Image: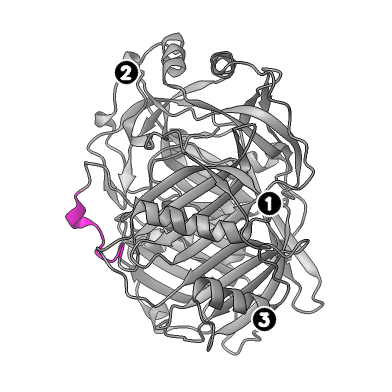
């Protein structure tokens, strides 16, 4: 199992800002490293030249822009539509210039897609930080080969930053992505595929996690995207001496002592994932999952920074149906459900209905309501997502206008009662379950001890409301089922829940017998033997603030794998 950062709890994950644009995401999660909470919004080309386009750029930014146009000559045909100086551009202390260039005319046809590039530069150094280039003339659904993409990305990086490229190591694994859009003339679906190549910064010839350059390349070798967002040039003198690290055998022994594992069922455990289409081959399994966290390379102890609160044994319960469940097959029934069950009135809100497949393959109907308020003074919205095959609710989200409170919270027991009462109406048959998470989250961004909280953005939690996070899993033979779960976010002040999500095992799915299975100790030995450890530097960051010094850690390989509890074999999940 991939290591999990302590900030990414059940509730916090829902509101953390995105650190990586969609084009740079891979099918596997990035390794744990410096937390860089950076918001990269999807930008739209401006409709005409703004007054900011007349501003004078600093000489270093001008030089970098000119160099970029030399490396990508097609950019020369585009006109500067907007340029703007933005302090603290990504929330990490960097001041930048954001520039938009496009072939969009002053009197444009809004139904047409124009060639556009969004560029961000460091205002002080002039360094290119971010580029997103859309040129439909290059669009192709064909993915470039791994070696071709790496070759083109490496050549571009060398040309862009010169000898500094020697301070980066190209990662063997590449990501990929496809942008889909309708042809504005024919309406035909078109696709533009690209591969993402990652270059990791090296210090003392050791990777510095979280400091990397990402370049996206299409089949024609065109550079579509570039990202290099680093808070500051790291002070090499502060990095621990790698010669003092534990030996690899000693680190493996330490991992055995620190490793935590759990026996679980999964009715749809992926065995392979097609990274282009998202299609998965699955199988019901009884397995051991292990959460291998980074170890201090000098002591062998788990790095405190990555630890999550230890899970208790959980709270067992039996869910007993009090009705016939919720069957929603129309807008009217969805609105009635919101009113009667959640006390949410959609009067005055705009309605929209869509249909799409969920990440687990379930075809859904999405009913949503939101306020028609261009100034966002009315935050109310609601979403009810239905499984198209049986009209059962799989997801609910609501946002209300009730003022947030800072005290007078309901108790944990009351939050548990609210969740159980709802599920008694939701389930249609008696169900053995386990509450695995029940926590009051007053601040989802719990800062490390080294953070100066007086320097944090005062608006960071402006609209946040204290929540109880509740997660309940189904049981089979008293063993937790990973993909049979219910999760809630319950307003700690009002007791109203504003988030619900359900994943249930498909009826008739046979789960493996639990009569015999290997011990946790044997499974752990198998997992550790197959785990590679890599020395890495980590310099933790939190909203632009850096820890006093970096850490030297042994990072476990983060490929997706588990131990089959019946056979005792390590099963890697194949990424195609």
Q: Residue at x 36, y 18 (%)?
A: 300
Q: Position of residue 126 (x, y in %)?
A: 36, 57
**Is label 1 in a helix, a strand or a loop?**
loop
State which quarter of the image contains the C terminus: top right
Within-10-Å neighbours for mark 1: few <14, some 14–19, many 20+: some
Q: Quadrant of residue 524?
A: top right
State which quarter of the image contains the N terminus: top right
- Above-or-below relation of 71 to 32: below
Q: Magenta residues, as a range?
A: 452-461
Q: In the depicted view, which residue is nearer to us: 144 or 480?
A: 480
**Is label 2 in a helix, a strand or a loop?**
loop
Check disc 1 and report the residue beneath it: 429
**Is label 3 in a helix, a strand or a loop?**
helix
Q: Residue at x 47, y 86 (%)?
A: 373
Q: Position of residue 503 (x, y in %)?
A: 64, 51
Res 232 visible: no
> Which label sits in the foreground, 1 or 2?
1
Q: Earlier in the sequence, mark 1 or mark 2?
A: 2
Left or right, 420 with respect to 230, comes to right
Left or right, 567 with respect to 317, comes to right
Magenta stretch: includes residue 327: no
- Above-or-below relation of 293 to 78: above
Q: Position of residue 485 (x, y in %)?
A: 59, 47
Q: Earlier in the sequence, mark 2 or mark 3?
A: 2
- Above-or-below relation of 153 to 479: below
Left or right, 268 with respect to 5, comes to right
């Amino acid at each position: 199992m991939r290591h999990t950062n302590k900030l990414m709890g059940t509730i916090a994950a829902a509101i953390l800002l995105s650190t990586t644009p969609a084009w740079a995401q891979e099918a596997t999660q990035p390794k744990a490293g410096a937390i860089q909470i950076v918001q990269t919004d999807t930008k739209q080309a401006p409709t005409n030249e703004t007054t900011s386009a007349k501003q004078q750029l600093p000489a270093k930014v001008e030089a970098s822009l000119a160099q970029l146009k030399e490396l990508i000559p097609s950019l020369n045909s585009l006109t500067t539509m907007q340029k703007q100086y933005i302090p603290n551009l990504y929330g990490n202390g960097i001041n930048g210039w954001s520039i938009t260039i496009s072939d969009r005319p002053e009197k444009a046809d809004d139904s047409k897609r124009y060639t556009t590039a969004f560029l961000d530069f460091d205002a002080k150094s002039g360094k290119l930080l971010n580029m997103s280039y859309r040129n439909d003339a290059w669009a192709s659904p064909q993915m470039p080969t791994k070696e071709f993409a790496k070759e083109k990305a490496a050549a571009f990086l060398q040309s862009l930053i010169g000898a500094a490229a020697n301070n980066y190591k190209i990662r063997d694994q590449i990501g990929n992505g496809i942008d889909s859009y309708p042809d504005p003339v024919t309406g035909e679906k078109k696709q533009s595929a690209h591969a993402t190549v990652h270059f990791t910064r090296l210090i003392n010839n050791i990777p510095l996690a979280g400091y990397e350059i990402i370049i996206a390349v299409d089949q024609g070798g065109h550079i579509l995207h570039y990202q290099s967002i680093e808070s500051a040039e790291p002070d090499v003198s502060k990095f621990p001496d790698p010669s003092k690290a534990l030996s690899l055998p000693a680190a493996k022994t330490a991992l055995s002592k620190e490793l935590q594992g759990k026996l679980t069922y999964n009715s749809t455990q992926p065995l392979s994932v097609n990274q282009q289409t998202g299609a998965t081959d699955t199988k019901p399994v009884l397995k051991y999952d292990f959460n291998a966290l980074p170890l201090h390379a000098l002591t062998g102890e788990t790095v405190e920074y990555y630890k999550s609160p230890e899970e208790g044994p959980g709270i067992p319960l039996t869910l007993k149906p009090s009705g016939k469940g919720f069957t929603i097959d129309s807008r009217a029934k969805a609105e009635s459900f919101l009113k009667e069950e959640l006390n949410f009135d959609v009067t005055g809100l705009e309605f929209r209905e869509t249909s799409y497949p969920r990440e687990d393959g379930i075809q859904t109907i999405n009913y949503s309501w939101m306020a028609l308020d261009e100034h966002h003074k009315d935050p109310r919205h609601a979403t009810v997502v239905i499984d198209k095959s049986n009209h059962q609710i799989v997801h609910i989200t609501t946002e209300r206008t009730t003022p947030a409170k800072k005290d007078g919270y309901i108790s944990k027991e009351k939050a548990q009662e609210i969740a159980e009462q709802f599920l008694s109406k939701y389930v249609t048959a008696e169900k053995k379950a386990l509450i695995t998470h029940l926590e009051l989250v007053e601040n989802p961004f719990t800062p490390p001890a080294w953070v100066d909280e007086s320097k944090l953005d005062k608006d960071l939690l402006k609209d946040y409301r204290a929540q109880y996070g509740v997660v309940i899993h189904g049981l089979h033979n008293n063993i937790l089922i990973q993909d049979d779960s219910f999760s809630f976010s319950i307003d700690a002040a009002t007791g109203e829940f504003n988030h619900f999500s359900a994943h249930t095992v498909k009826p008739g799915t046979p789960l493996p017998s639990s009569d015999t299975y290997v011990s946790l100790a044997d499974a752990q030995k198998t997992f550790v033997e197959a785990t590679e450890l890599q020395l890495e530097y980590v310099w933790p960051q939190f909203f632009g603030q850096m820890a006093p010094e970096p850490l030297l850690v042994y990072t476990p390989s983060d490929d997706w794998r588990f131990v089959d509890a019946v056979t005792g074999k390590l099963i890697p999940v194949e990424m195609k």
